[in-house]
Image: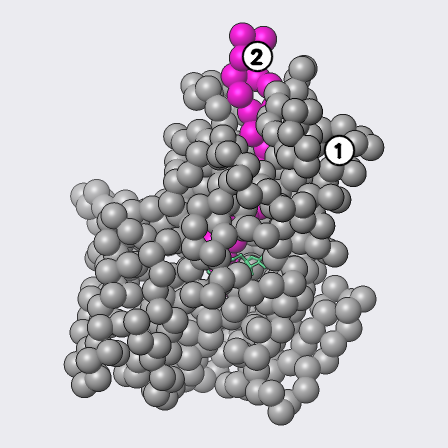
């Protein structure tokens, strides 16, 4: 498939995107039972076996955390896993339209909440920086709307490698970055469009203030605890060394209750559940910030509303990968439980969604945007790429139904709608927020 040439930064141009491989991370995969035909002893496997031998079996959450973000050997820390040469592909890497519509969503929220004189755009897990780049292009194009607004960009990223790629994507090479590995703000610079940009390892280090937060395919990489219902009650799944096969890991059940069980709902009806305390902590922090200083958060990911069971899976080279084989060489992920995110936001901010990606993008005007780009392009390969990207994002059998949008907003944002509503209207408040209703974007 052809790779597009970056043909300009104008609002009507098609921007370069990689060819689209056939797999994305939202695909379902049951883990742990695959044969160990190919089980190289990776440095991470050695590290984990040493750890288990010294202190005993580890939780799935600890396993995920070590494998993905261990500062010395973690999968995310030193590699670029995105795109055709990597392990998986994400929506912003597939089509520029995705980021453009998200940029419009943030501007729409900024306008709806009184056009503050400044805001921070904060992205959690920015990958290659492609999404924030597309959003900033929209901000530049709508410069006349945003001209009196001071914008700054704040990226929360644990990966040294990806932060370097983000800097290359978003800043001018000739303008040196300020670096301080020991500081919570480990890198600082200015974007190509002249906006201050900073990098952090943790959300809590990002300055508090009126902010728009974005998390695309971020929550699914946060560590999950897994539980199995047994006649004795819930038992947590641990990872241990297989006593029968050398250098192999296996799943085992804890013999007694473990503390993370507290995260399971009392009325839970499933027999197997995954819980993600780190997702809860992040949503609480986002909710507190939004309640305190205003703004909004947009979360997009694959997931469910408290219905799925075993979704822990691995990806390597655009193929599904056994999660226990060659740890450190493959991405690990679990579906996001949006019902849990909603519970963690409750009482602090209002939440909208989850709604399906195809509905959100349709409401945001993806068809109009596609038509504009197609009308503007005479190059058959560019047109083909745009159409294929659209199909991948929107087709219910592809990313259209697997991916969801979820938003956090201050209560006043939706209560404002209540006053504006005619008492006889029965439309939900959500109709006032772009993307979550057809009406909002007409
Ligand atoms: N949002 C991007 C990338 C998704 S991959 C896209 O859609 O293309 C997940 C991203 O989260 C990567 O940038 C990874 O380095 C980052 N990440 C993973 N764990 C993290 C953590 N605990 N804190 C901050 N960033 C993390």
Callout 2: helix, strand or loop?
strand
Q: Which residues are magenta?
A: 211-236
Callout 1: helix, strand or loop?
helix
- Residue 162 in the magenta stretch? The answer is no
Q: Which residue is mark 1?
A: 52
Q: Residue furthest bottom?
A: 174
Tag in front: 2 or 1? 1
**Rendered location of residue 75, percent (x, y):** 62, 54
Residue in the image at 55% along x and 24% along y: 227
In the foreground, 375 or 79? 79
Q: Which residue is mark 2?
A: 233
In the drawing, does residue 404 fall left or right of residue 36?
A: left
Can see residue 380? Answer: yes
In the foreground, 252 or 13? 252
Identify whether 89 is placed above or below 258. Answer: below
Whether residues under marks 2 and 1 lie with C-beta atoms below 8 angstroms apart, the answer is no
- Residue 227 in the magenta stretch? The answer is yes
Residue in the image at 67% along x and 49% along y: 42
Quarter of the picture containing the C terminus is bottom left
**Rendered location of residue 80, percent (x, y):** 56, 65
Q: Residue furthest front?
A: 37
- Count how many numbered circles sit on residues in the image: 2
Dividing the image into four quarters, tell me where ligand 1 lies: bottom right
């Amino acid at each position: 498939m052809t790779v597009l040439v970056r043909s300009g930064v104008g609002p009507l141009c098609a921007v370069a995107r990689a060819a689209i491989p056939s797999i994305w991370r939202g695909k379902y995969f049951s883990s742990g039972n695959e044969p160990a035909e190919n089980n190289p002893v990776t440095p991470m496997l050695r590290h984990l076996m040493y750890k288990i031998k010294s202190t005993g079996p580890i939780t799935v959450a600890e396993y995920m955390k070590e494998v993905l973000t261990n500062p010395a050997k973690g999968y995310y820390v030193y590699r670029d896993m995105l795109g055709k040469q990597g392990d998986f592909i994400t929506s912003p890497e597939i089509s520029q339209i995705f980021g453009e519509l998200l940029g419009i969503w943030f501007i729409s929220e900024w306008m709806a909440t009184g056009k503050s004189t400044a805001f921070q755009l904060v992205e959690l897990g920015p990958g290659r920086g492609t999404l924030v780049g597309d959003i900033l292009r929209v901000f530049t194009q709508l410069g006349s709307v945003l001209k009196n607004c001071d914008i700054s960009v704040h990226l929360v990223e644990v990966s040294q490698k990806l932060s370097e790629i983000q800097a290359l994507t978003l800043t001018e090479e000739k303008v040196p970055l300020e670096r301080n590995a020991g500081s919570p703000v480990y890198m600082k610079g200015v974007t190509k469009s002249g906006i201050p940009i900073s990098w952090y390892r943790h959300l809590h280090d990002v300055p508090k203030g009126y902010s728009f937060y974005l998390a695309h395919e971020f929550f699914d990489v946060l560590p999950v605890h897994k539980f199995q219902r047994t006649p004795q009650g819930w038992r947590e799944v641990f990872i241990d060394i297989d006593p029968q096969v050398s250098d192999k890991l296996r799943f085992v059940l804890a013999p007694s209750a473990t503390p993370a069980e507290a995260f399971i709902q009392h009325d839970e009806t499933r027999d197997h559940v995954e819980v993600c305390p780190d997702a809860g902590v992040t949503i609480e922090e986002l909710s507190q910030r939004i309640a305190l200083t205003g703004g909004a958060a947009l979360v997009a990911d694959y997931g469910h509303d408290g219905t799925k069971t075993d979704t822990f899976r691995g990806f390597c080279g655009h193929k599904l990968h056994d999660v226990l084989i060659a740890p450190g060489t493959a991405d690990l992920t679990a579906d996001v439980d949006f019902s849990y995110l909603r519970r963690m936001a409750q009482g602090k901010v209002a939440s909208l969604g989850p709604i399906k990606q195809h509905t959100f993008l349709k409401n945001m005007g993806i068809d109009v945007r596609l038509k504009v780009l197609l009308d503007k392009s005479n190059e058959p390969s560019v047109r083909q790429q745009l159409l294929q990207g659209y199909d991948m994002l929107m087709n219910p059998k592809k990313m259209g139904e697997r991916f969801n949008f979820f938003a956090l907003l201050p209560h006043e944002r939706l209560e404002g709608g209540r006053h504006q509503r005619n008492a006889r209207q029965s439309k939900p408040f959500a109709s006032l927020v772009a993307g979550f209703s057809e009406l909002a974007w007409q």
